[in-house]
Structures are given as structure tokens and as C-alpha cells.
Image (cartoon, rainbow, N blue to C red):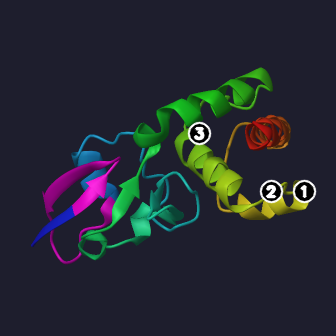
């Protein structure tokens, strides 16, 4: 079956079978940031946004995204690079394998939660596994990033 959807602000068409998962379609369309790490919805490596909400693309049937807007890391490069600098400064990027899905969830959290505390951040990111960092450097990076973003938003509101 043929489906059409918006991928990173561009209309695309894909031929999919009834059991094709979105992860495979996105990789076929060149979105290499979307990775398969577990195939059991446990690692967060395949995180994308569907209509602005974080979803695990390994658990979404491609046929269900017709007419929807899909965003991958390739579609938010500027924001991702900004947060990536915070990760690097705190030593939280390590091997980088988990970074795309992790960054997608951090950016979604920024949009959804206003001034989250440490426990809210941990809860929001509970589905993202990292095998290298121990999470403390990542949490410091998130807190610093969120503080800077809050300050930026405050200055923009006053302007």
C-alpha cells in the first residue's frame, strides 16, 4: 500500500506492507539517526515525533502514519546541535549511539514540561537506555540546557 506523510517538513510517499514498522521506512528514506537497538520498545533509540509527540518508531505500523507529520533528528538539527554542546560539555555523549533518540526526547520534554525538576526529568526519560554514561552527566547537561532555555524564553517574552 502507498502512504503519504510529512517527513521533516517535506511531503514523502512510501510503499509499505501491512506489517511494516515505521523505523524501517524512515531508514529507507535516509533518516539514519533512527536506530534499531532492541526491537522491544525498551531502549528509545528509535524515538521520533509523530505530530509533535515522542513515539518509538519500532512500535508504530507505517500504514498508520499516512497524513501525519513525522520528525526525526535530521529535522531538528539546529536544536539538537545546541543541546549536543551541553551533552559534550558534561561528558554525557560517550559513544553517542543512544544520542539521537535521547536528544529527541529531551527536545520533546522541553516543549511539554515547564521547568521540570530532577525527578520529572528522570521519569520523562525513563525509556532511554544508555550503556556508557551512568546518566549523571546527561542529567547535568539537561538541567543546564533547560535553565538556559528558560532564560532565553524569558528574555524573548520581555522583548
Question: Along the horizontal axis of the image, is 61 left or right of 98?
Answer: left
Q: Is residue 139 magenta?
A: no
Q: Residue at x 85, y 39 (%)?
A: 147
Front residue of this view, candidates 20 and 155: 155
In whole angstroms, how far apart are the C-alphas of marks 3 and 2?
16 Å
> Residue 137, can we see it?
no
Q: Does label 1 or label 3 sit earlier along the sequence? A: 3
Segment tinted magenta in the rendering: 5-22
Q: Are marks 3 and 2 in contact (CB under 8 Å)?
A: no
Front residue of this view, candidates 46 and 113: 113
| Residue to which mark 2 is pinned | 121
Label 3: how many Cα within 10 Å (few below 14, some 14–19, many 20+)? many
Question: Along the horizontal axis of the image, is 105 left or right of 63?
Answer: right
**Residue 66: image x %, image y %?**
24, 70
| Residue to which mark 3 is pinned | 99
Viewport quadrant of the N terminus? bottom left
Indicate the secondary structure of the residue bearing disc 1: loop
**Residue 142: image x %, image y %?**
78, 41
**Residue 57: image x %, image y %?**
41, 62
Q: Are marks 2 and 1 in contact (CB under 8 Å)?
A: yes
Q: Does label 3 or label 2 sit earlier along the sequence? A: 3
Label 2: how many Cα within 10 Å (few below 14, some 14–19, many 20+)? some
Amino acid at each position: 500500500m502507498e502512504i503519504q506523510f510529512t517527513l521533516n517538513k517535506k511531503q514523502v510517499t512510501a510503499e509499505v506492507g501491512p506489517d511494516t514498522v515505521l523505523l524501517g521506512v524512515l531508514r529507507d528514506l535516509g533518516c539514519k539517526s533512527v536506530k534499531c537497538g532492541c526491537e522491544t520498545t525498551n531502549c528509545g533509540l528509535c524515538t521520533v515525533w509523530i505530530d509533535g509527540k515522542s513515539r518509538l518508531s519500532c512500535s508504530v505500523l507505517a500504514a498508520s502514519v499516512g497524513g501525519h507529520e513525522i520528525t526525526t533528528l535530521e529535522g531538528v538539527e539546529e536544536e539538537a546541535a545546541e543541546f549536543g554542546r551541553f551533552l559534550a560539555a558534561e561528558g554525557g555523549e560517550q559513544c553517542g549511539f543512544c544520542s539521537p533518540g535521547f536528544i529527541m526526547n529531551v527536545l520533546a520534554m522541553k516543549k511539554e514540561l515547564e521547568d521540570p525538576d530532577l525527578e520529572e526529568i528522570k521519569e520523562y526519560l525513563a525509556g532511554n537506555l544508555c550503556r556508557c554514561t551512568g546518566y549523571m552527566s546527561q542529567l547535568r547537561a539537561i538541567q543546564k540546557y533547560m535553565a538556559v532555555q528558560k532564560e532565553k524564553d524569558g528574555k524573548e517574552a520581555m522583548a
